Image (tube, helix red, strand yellow):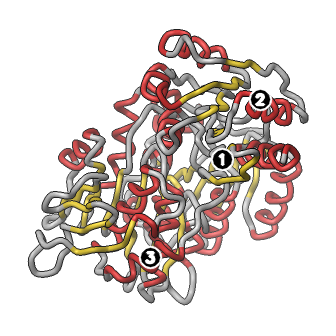
């Protein structure tokens, strides 16, 4: 139907056949919202387990058609496909949709189109290879400290479709967006947006690093307030330069060094704003101290600066930035200290599931016994090992792709003690922690920052971190 691209919250959806790809959390929310608008909805998913069947029963009771066990076939007479994150662009479903001229929207695109016609909340959005969730949580804490009705949504927190339909309405949304979600979004126009960093990840999904970066860069399209970038990562600044933004939008950098005009940065132990300093934008405004950032690590200070830049672009005061950072506490498994045993600190950063994240974690400590390995997802580790070798005293390697890391260690840190743990059963983590404890001495940090995904040995990075913490507590 020719008018489909203009469909929004107040449109007549009764003649629209929407196909929802995926019956997970976001797919369920999309189907529920579309049914509420009066669309005819078909939900498809290649899975057919107990959870999927339970969700299917609910949606069918609401009027949807659900097809489990078939995620490839495009139903006839489809007007639009709404996809959950993670479905590959090469999927037969999307190939068929593209061949038939059927638009493909991500659930974020649908949420954007379903914003209220008047008085819609502004979106302050964050993407990047690492640090997205922490930055969005920090931003939400800052916005709340400013007295605004705010919520973390998108790839973290509440599904965006629930948020945009909620009553009473929010003042502002702190939105985490993945490269998958941005790939399927075409009409988003944020108030302000930040790309924290770009490093190889999900290249198998996007095809190459340039395509991955370009998907991230979609977050800047149409920005009216500020495009926030990482001064230490030139690729993020280039994405700003390449973006088509609303006239008047500003480029605002953040840096761990002293900020120049138009930037936020660090001077001694102060977080300082030289971008939003009132009538004279070059004037430095003190926002907080580094002690207000918990946990205090270089990459977490970067997260805080990015969150502060987004909040300041929305008119939030310096005091609210400070109060919000002081009130914030990170989610589990992000450089979380578990215990100190015999002078050795044990830190859980199981969320470090790629080399870029692990490198940031390793930079936070001077003497490290590093626990690394898992599913590499095609990543390489030479740069990580070469940069981090001076800090690493010993390594405990685990998981399916441990040999890839072992070879990088042989090339760039041949003298380091390396222990390989071959066990992969439920008791493996106790062996891993015992080996790390044997290698560690007073003043060292045993750091679980695997640089790999967890699913070869654990159900998730959270379970991996939980088992690490339990093993450490048993050790103590």
Identified at 18% across, 71% down, the residue is: 284
Looking at the rendered structure, the secondary structure element under dot 2 is helix
Identify the residue position indicated by label 2 in the image: 438
- Given residues 240 and 393, the one toward you in this image is 393
Is 48 positioned to the left or the right of 362 in the image?
right
Q: Are marks 1 and 3 in contact (CB under 8 Å)?
A: no
- Given residues 256 and 464, the one toward you in this image is 256
Which circle, 3 or 2, is nearer the viewer?
2
Compared to 214, does 57 lie above or below?
below
Compared to 287, does 108 lie above or below?
above
Cα distance in 3D space between marks 1 and 2: 16 Å
Which numbered disc covers residue 142?
Answer: 3
Identified at 49% across, 25% down, the residue is: 389
Identified at 46% across, 77% down, the residue is: 324
Mark earlier in primary sequence (3, 2): 3
Cα distance in 3D space between marks 1 and 3: 26 Å
Is 439 positioned to the left or the right of 187 in the image?
right
Which numbered disc covers residue 347?
Answer: 1
- Given residues 302 and 90, the one toward you in this image is 302
Mark earlier in primary sequence (1, 3): 3
Mark earlier in primary sequence (1, 2): 1
> Where is residue 321 drawn, in percent x and y?
38, 76
Identified at 45% across, 89% down, the residue is: 147
> Where is residue 273 drawn, in percent x and y?
24, 68
Which circle, 1 or 3, is nearer the viewer?
1
Res 75 visible = no
Q: Can you tell which quarter of the image residue 417 is in?
A: top right
> Where is residue 325 drawn, in percent x and y?
46, 72
Cα distance in 3D space between marks 3 and 2: 42 Å
Neighbour tally class for label 3: few under 14, some 14-19, many 20 plus, Cα within 10 Å: many
């Amino acid at each position: 139907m020719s008018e489909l691209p203009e469909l929004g919250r107040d449109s007549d959806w009764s003649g629209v056949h929407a196909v929802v790809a995926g019956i997970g959390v976001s797919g369920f929310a999309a189907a529920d919202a579309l049914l509420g608008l009066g669309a005819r909805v078909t939900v498809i998913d290649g899975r057919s387990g107990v959870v999927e069947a339970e969700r299917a029963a609910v949606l069918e009771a609401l009027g949807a058609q659900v097809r489990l066990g078939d995620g490839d076939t495009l139903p006839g007479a489809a007007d639009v496909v709404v996809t959950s994150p993670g479905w590959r662009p090469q999927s037969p479903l999307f190939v068929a949709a593209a061949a038939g001229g059927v638009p493909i929207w991500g659930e974020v695109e649908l949420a954007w189109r379903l914003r209220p016609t008047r008085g819609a909340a502004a979106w302050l959005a964050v993407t990047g290879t690492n640090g997205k969730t922490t930055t969005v949580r920090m931003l939400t804490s800052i916005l709340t400290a400013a007295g605004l009705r705010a919520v973390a949504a998108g790839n973290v927190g509440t599904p965006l479709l629930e948020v945009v339909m909620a009553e009473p309405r929010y003042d502002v949304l702190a939105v985490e967006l993945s490269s998958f979600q941005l790939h399927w979004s075409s009409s988003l126009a944020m108030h302000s947006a930040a790309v924290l960093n770009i490093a190889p990840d999900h290249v198998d999904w996007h095809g190459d690093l340039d395509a991955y970066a370009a998907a991230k860069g979609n977050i800047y399209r149409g920005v009216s307030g500020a495009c926030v970038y990482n001064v230490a990562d030139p690729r993020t600044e280039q994405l700003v330069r390449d973006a088509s933004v609303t006239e008047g939008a500003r480029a605002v950098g953040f840096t761990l060094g002293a900020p120049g005009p138009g930037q936020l940065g660090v001077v001694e132990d102060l977080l300082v704003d030289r971008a939003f300093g009132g009538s004279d934008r070059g004037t430095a405004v003190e926002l907080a101290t580094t002690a207000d950032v918990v946990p205090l690590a270089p990459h977490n200070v970067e997260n805080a600066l990015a969150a502060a830049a987004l909040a300041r672009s929305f008119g939030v005061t310096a005091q609210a930035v400070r109060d919000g950072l002081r009130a914030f506490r990170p989610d589990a498994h992000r450089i979380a200290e578990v215990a100190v045993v015999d002078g050795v600190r044990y830190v859980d950063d199981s969320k470090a599931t790629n080399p870029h994240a692990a490198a940031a974690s390793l930079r936070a400590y001077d003497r490290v016994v590093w626990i690394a390995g898992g599913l590499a997802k095609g990543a390489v580790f030479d740069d990580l090992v070469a940069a981090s070798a001076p800090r690493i005293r010993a390594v405990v390697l685990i998981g399916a792709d441990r040999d890839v890391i072992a070879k990088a260690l042989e090339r760039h840190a041949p003298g380091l003690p390396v222990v390989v743990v071959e066990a992969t059963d439920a008791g493996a983590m106790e062996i891993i922690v015992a080996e790390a404890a044997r290698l560690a001495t007073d003043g060292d940090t045993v750091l679980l920052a695997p640089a790999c995904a967890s699913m070869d040995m654990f159900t998730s990075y959270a379970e991996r971190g939980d088992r690490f913490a339990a093993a450490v507590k048993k050790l103590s």
